[in-house]
């Protein structure tokens, strides 16, 4: 006799506590893992737009630095989502931010 077990894989929940830290030449994006995680995290997907170009990066960390920017540069449509064996979860709310206009003194 063979026992067949079925596991239902479900995508993770939405990212929590997305934070944007503005710098002179970069934007630091941080977040908490989603609740519920619904499995083992594969990676996070960070999406953003610079000068009309949509960019996508994957990371296993709960932070990412968007670098090589100019002062007072707009970074728009920033979202983060998590992916597990169940698929990609719902993306965070979109945010827009400008880099700092001058360095902090």
Image: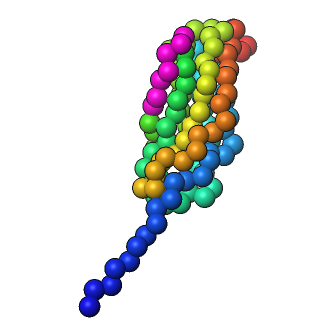
Residue 34 highlighted magenta (yes or no) = no
Q: From the top left corner, tell me how far across and down residue 25 is, in percent.
A: 58, 14
Q: In the displayed structure, does residue 26 sit left or right of residue 42?
A: right
Give the residue displayed 46% in from the left and 62% down from the top.
9
Q: From the top left corner, tell me how far across and down residue 17 is, in percent.
A: 69, 42
Magenta stretch, main secondary structure, is strand
Q: Quarter holding the C terminus?
A: top right
Instruction: Say if residue 24 shows up in the picture.
Output: no
Instruction: Say if residue 82 shows up in the picture.
Output: yes
Give the residue displayed 45% in from the left and 45% down from the top.
43
- In terms of depth relative to the viewer, which is nearer, 54 or 43? 54
Instruction: Place residue 15 in its image quadrant.
Output: top right
Q: Quarter holding the N terminus?
A: bottom left
Quick one: which residue is furthest to the right in this view? 105
Q: Which residues are magenta?
A: 51-57
Give the residue displayed 59% in from the left and 33% down from the top.
79
Give the residue displayed 62% in from the left and 10% down from the top.
73
């Amino acid at each position: 006799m063979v026992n067949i077990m079925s596991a239902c894989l479900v995508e993770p929940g939405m990212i929590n506590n997305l934070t944007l830290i503005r710098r002179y030449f970069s934007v630091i994006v941080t977040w908490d893992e989603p609740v519920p995680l619904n499995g083992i995290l594969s990676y996070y997907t960070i999406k953003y737009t610079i000068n009309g170009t949509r960019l996508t990066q994957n990371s296993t960390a709960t932070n990412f630095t968007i670098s090589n920017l100019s002062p007072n540069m707009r970074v728009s449509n920033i979202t983060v989502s998590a992916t597990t064996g169940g698929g990609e979860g719902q993306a965070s709310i979109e945010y827009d931010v400008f880099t700092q206009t001058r360095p902090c003194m």
